[in-house]
Amino acid sequence: MSNQTNQDFEVIVIDGNSDDGTVTKAEAFASKLNITVKTVKKRNVSFQRNTGGKLAKYNWIIFMDADNRLPPYLLDGVRYQLSKSPKTDIFTLWIKVDSTARIDKTLEQALNFGMELYNKIGKAAALGSFIGCRKSVVNKIKFDEKQKYAEDGMFTNAAKTAGFVFSIFREPSYFYSLRRIQAGGVLHNVQKVAQLQLQFLRGRNMYDVDYPMLGGAYYDTRPEGIVKKMHDYINHATQQQVIQARKLFRSLRN
């Protein structure tokens, strides 16, 4: 964040009592950034996001993973997009991966396409690695601290259902970290992921699910194969929605 071309922002780090030196590293930027570091005993990403949202002073808030990498112009790019879309209340960005490996690029396409596809069928969803919203959104909508899966998508969808305007901006993009996916290894049970996606799409709670880390080999296929799996996940979609999704996918690849 210290290299952003526009420095008119605050940084709030909510550390879940970690032992990886996060607090020390964050505090080292005190002379460069307007930064607040708070340690909480509860290790729960939704709790930490809600805590940070309460502390935020500005009218716009970005919830972001610590391992993202941002281009220097990202915040200026976001401000430009919001100026073009003044009705937007909550938004996310497309991701990029810092890799040319076929598996990783397929993952990049799948995640970007997945957000667009879900939005097309009326189920607003965003990756928790980057969600921006007005302060008025977090005053009304909270991340569900009981959910073990898709709490990010549930937050954005709840905001849209409450009448807030959700947008997906394709530019600027940020670099999404693959470390958790790579550390998770190969996912052998694709059906479990499909079931979790269906639960999310049907608005069911995820209080007791066994949340899997998606291994890279799950995406080691042609992007069209990913689309087929996604269509299976959302088999309640209408034929017209499927046609729209296919058109969208073709436009994303061009």
Image (cartoon, rainbow, N blue to C red):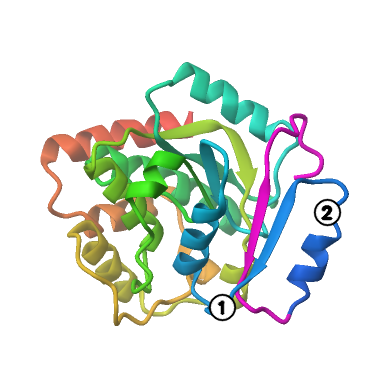
Task: Estimate the x, y position of residue 235 in percent, counting from the top left.
Answer: 16, 55
Observer-nearest of 27 and 200: 27
Mark 2 or mark 1, earlier in chain: 2
Chief secondary structure of the magenta span? loop
> Which residue corresponds to the image point at 22% horizontal and 41% vertical from the top-left?
122
In the image: residue 197, left or right of residue 30: left
Amino acid type at mark 1 = Gly
Q: Give the range drawn in magenta.
A: 1-19
> Which residue corresponds to the image point at 48% horizontal and 70% vertical from the top-left?
214
Position above or below: 84 against 91: above
> Which residue corresponds to the image point at 56% horizontal and 54% vertical from the top-left?
55
Amino acid type at mark 2 = Ala
Q: In the drawing, what numbered circle is on residue 185?
A: 1
Task: Estimate the x, y position of residue 84 in percent, counting from the top left.
Answer: 48, 17
- Residue that carries the numbered disc 2 in the rendered image: 30
In the image: residue 147, left or right of residue 82: left
Observer-nearest of 12 and 118: 12
**Secondary structure state at the residue bearing disc 1:** loop
Instruction: Characterize the local packing of mark 1: few (<14), some (14-19) or many (20 or more) Cα atoms within 10 angstroms.
Output: some
**Secondary structure state at the residue bearing disc 2:** loop
Observer-nearest of 18 and 99: 18
| Label 2 to label 1: alpha-carbon separation | 37 Å
Q: Is residue 156 visible?
A: yes
- Report if the CB atoms under discs 2 and 1 are less than 8 Å apart: no
